[in-house]
Image: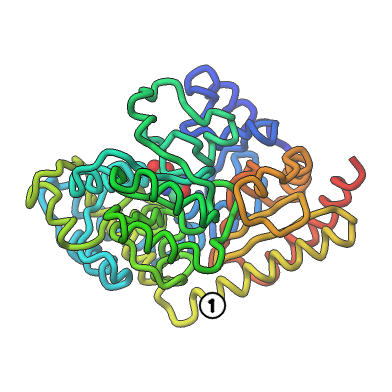
Amino acid sequence: MNHDRSHALFTRASELLPGGVNSPVRAFKSVGGEPFFAQRAQGPYLFDVDGNRYIDYVGSWGPMIAGHAHPQVLDAVARTMRDGLSFGVPNPLEVTMAEAITSIVPSCEMVRMVNSGTEATLSAIRVARGATGRSRIVKFEGCYHGHGDSFLVKAGSGALTFGLPNSPGVPKALADLTLTLPYNDFEAATALFDEVGIDIAGLIIEPIVGNANCILPREGYLQHLRELCTRHGALLIFDEVMTGFRVALGGAQQRYGIAPDLSTFGKIIGGGMPVGAFGGRRDLMRQVAPSGPIYQAGTLSGNPVAMAAGLATLELIQAQGFHDALEASTHALCGGLEAAAREAGVAFHTTRAPGMFGLYFREGPVESFADALGSDAAKFGRFFHAMLERGVYLAPSAFEAGFMSSAHSEADIAATVDAARAAFAVVAAA
Ligand code: PMP
């Protein structure tokens, strides 16, 4: 595979952008080597500037659940943009979007659109603090909620990959207000709430942890957190930026039958455009400006083109059987990879939810952050590059979930498993 053009671009970019990129994980730091530069994308494929094609299991980190460049999404964008890119006054698509989100996710009685997942989570904890009059928030080791100051404490995703659990620039006084818990540990949560429950404004969690690879909740765990929050007067915040509209139409809260007080979204509801949202109980959302005193705003929030892309995507995923098919293809992929690893004699385990999966170079089960960290990152790096050379693009880190779209066909999955047979042999031989 030739990468001359990508290499030349990365050389230029490295002088101008920190690490040559606009978001850390893209730089391939954790797997080594250099990123490729995308020229275009179609369905399940990415095409780089050197003309190489990859079966893409990142999907722009989640938004492209219906595949890249879906004609219905592109048409909606093209139609909408002819009328202007931004108005700075309300537009009808914002109302349609709010109706779509609140009808798909019943715990969200009202929503506010923002421009990224980071904005959504920042705003949600402000609402939690403003509404409860308390200061402390609880998060979980390995969970990533964007790069807001309060969340860069034992964070997942790039912050984990680069070993920067506490970023310089986050004031200690603020970080001290963030308490962390081990995910899936019932007793630790009970003990923390027994001790300081009265000070806790909100507990924020990725209901399925997609930023420390992919860790599923133990039976009853999310319910346990729901009960603790209710008992201690803290708000339960589900960060569904990744899981929302993916693991079920109504997200993880539908899949596990839990009603959080507040939820955050992003990715899919923008269909590939920069979008986020937070929403929840009406009595809480009514406290957001201008109907209430908790301030939150955005010049481009509710942008018509972004709403159009998101609405077109939401329409596609409401097709009959969409999430069942996504679940079936995720199982087919993960089952195929596990079988290929067994043939090669490589210790390997997968975790799965509809449309998202975790790959671990260790035996299962994986139920905690510590279990996830036990995956052999060096082996993952070798596997990642062996797959890339064979035209399969996995998330370039051992600690990120993979994503599937409805565009991945049986043939794509079979080609991926074929590539994996060779890639596991490379891992076994090293
Ligand atoms: N929350 C979760 C669960 C995420 O996965 C992410 C991003 N991957 C964010 C928040 C932050 O979203 P954004 O990158 O759009 O700011």
- Quadrant location of the C terminus? top right
Residue 218 place in picture, x, y as percent: 56, 63
Secondary structure type for disc 1:
helix
Relative depth, front residue between 104 and 18: 104
Q: Position of residue 178 (x, y in %)?
A: 38, 37
Spot occupied by residue 261 in the image (x, y as percentages of width and height): 28, 60
Residue carrying label 1: 324
Image: 256 above or below 205: below
Which residue corresponds to the image point at 63% horizontal and 31% vertical from the top-left? 29
Q: Position of residue 33 (x, y in %)?
A: 69, 31
Q: Answer yes or no: is residue 59 visible.
A: no
- State left or right for residue 261 relative to residue 338: left
**Colouring style:** rainbow
Name the side, left or right, on which 155 lies relative to 420.
Answer: left
The answer to which of 389 and 119 lies nearer the viewer is 119
Which residue corresponds to the image point at 32% horizontal and 69% vertical from the top-left? Answer: 105
The amino acid pointed to by label 1 is Asp
Residue 123 vertical placement versus 329 (above, below): above
Give whichever of 225, 13 is nearer the camera.
225
* Quadrant where the image shows the N terminus: top right
Residue at image position (82%, 50%) is 423
The image quarter in which residue 150 lies: top left
Q: Residue furthest right?
A: 429
Residue pushed farthest top?
15
Whether disc 1's CB lies below 8 Å from ligand 1 is answered no
Q: How would you rate the neighbour count of disc 1 (Cα within 10 Å): few for under 14, some for 14-19, many for 20 or more?
A: some
In the current view of this chain or complex, which residue is farthest to the left?
A: 291
Q: Above or below — where is 67 with respect to 6?
A: below
Q: Residue at x 27, y 73 (%)?
A: 103
